[in-house]
Amino acid sequence: MRRITLFATLAAGFCVCTSLSCSGGGGGGTGMPSATTTVTSGAITGFGSVKLVGKEYGTQNTSFVIDGHPGSQNDLKVGMVVTVNGSLSSSGTRTAATITQEDVVEGAIQAIPSTNDRIVVLGQTILIDNGTLFDNNIPGQNISGLVLGDLVEVNGFVKGKGLIIATLIEKRNPPAACGVQGIIENNNSGAQTFTIGTLTVSHSSAVFNDMPSTGGNAWNDILVEVKGSPCTQALQPFIATRVEPKRIDVANANEIEVEGTITQFSSASSFAVNGVPVVTNSSTVFESGDASDLALGVEVEVEGSLTNGVVTAEKVSFSDNVEIEGDVAALTSGGATPNLTVSGLPGITVFVNAQTNFKGGISNLGELAVGNHARVRGRPTGTNTVIAAEVRKRSPDTGVTLEGAVQAVANPNVTVLGVVIDTSTIADGNFKGLHGGKGRAAFFNAVKVGTLVSAKGDLMGGMVLWNEIEFQGEGS
């Protein structure tokens, strides 16, 4: 199959804002393929087959490409970011034709700040949180097992200029080919250089795949993959051997789902996720947020169809799909893992990091106190752990809110983040289900594992008396 690129759509200044007529290199075909074709891109969450972004693909006859080289399923690990091209049968079975894995950066560690929540590799700040996995070749399987100069391979997503969210970190033995994905800044066509983060890239002898003319500012703000050397700890010019825009290798698919961050933003109706152009329309459903929450660096999952290299989004889900509100039960503001817990929600631990925004008159976790009422928005990183994107101090209140994906259902109980919500105290009219339907029967007929729900109640004697529960997002 001829390699299809998405650059033409990106370089045209997001002409997809007004139509889908811009070609993504689809070889002249503009209609949807007759077969039920699928593309899924995201971090691997499990095996047996291959699981990612809530999808499971059989791999009996799959071809694997691991960082540009032929491989096998044995080369894959949980946390690796892959793109799966496959098909969906009439019975709902997914089969992968190809699975392609690519590192987001590989090189020597240049810095390990004392905050212990990041490392610096090839001029990129690699953000580490509770969702980051460490390979078993790293002592302790945590950041303390890394030292300056270690050669590491990082899977994850470009969050912004010079910023990467790590999903998996592995140690590598030199020699190794080095590379980086990132957003170009400071393009200098005369000097034949540009920067990605704090890394200066010299491309005078590089091979370019589908890049536009380098004149003027044409390269600035493009998400690219760069291969070259050196891999060393010292920050110095990186001599590129290859430069190409970040892309997927297919132009049309009946179904596509892409997990990652917004890497280019024109408007809420036209943006790119991991370099893949996305358009929204009046039919697009927003889950755990709305169109006004879209911005550069925001983590999302986009589902839709792919035509000429452009995703028409049927649903945009924000990864920060957890909301917790209540009184602070305990907090640890210092150390390597600052966190808090909330009264009435036993077992849930909320971690904060350098990317957490603090609002409501506070600028850090240390300005909260036990008993303060607070609201947290974030994303789950385990059965009952959350990374906070935002912590807001609020006025005193007995109200408790828990919003997240359902983990188990057994009427009258619904489990979210390990907390069993006993709905027996909720009046029939306060069950709010799909398509505006109400009532306990309608709710439990529709709710299932993975459904996003929001429950509200009041804290009484250390326990929550739940008084409302409703679906969130699609179809609600």
Image (cartoon, rainbow, N blue to C red):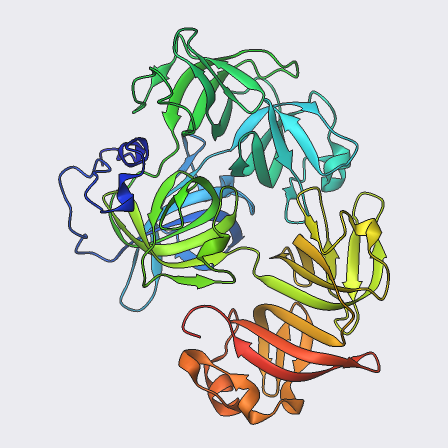
Comparing 225 with 318, the one in front is 318
Q: Is residue 368 visible?
A: yes
What residue sits 44% from the left and 85% below the top? 437
What residue sits 56% from the left and 26% below the top? 106
- List x then y, in percent, for residue 148: 73, 22
The vertical placement of 258 against 104, above or below, is below
- List x then y, in percent, for residue 460: 80, 83
What residue sits 35% from the left and 50% below the top? 269
Locate the N terminus by quadrant.
Answer: top left
Comparing 358 with 275, the one in front is 358
**Relative to 256, 114 lies left or right:** right
- List x then y, in percent, for residue 434: 43, 79
Q: Quadrant of residue 419?
A: bottom right
Q: Quadrant of residue 249?
A: top left
The vertical placement of 343 against 184, above or below, is below
Q: Looking at the image, which residue sits at the far left?
A: 28
- List x then y, in percent, for residue 108: 63, 22
Q: Is residue 50 visible?
A: no
The vertical placement of 37 against 204, above or below, is below
The vertical placement of 153 against 446, above or below, is above
Q: Quadrant of residue 175?
A: top right
Badge count: 0
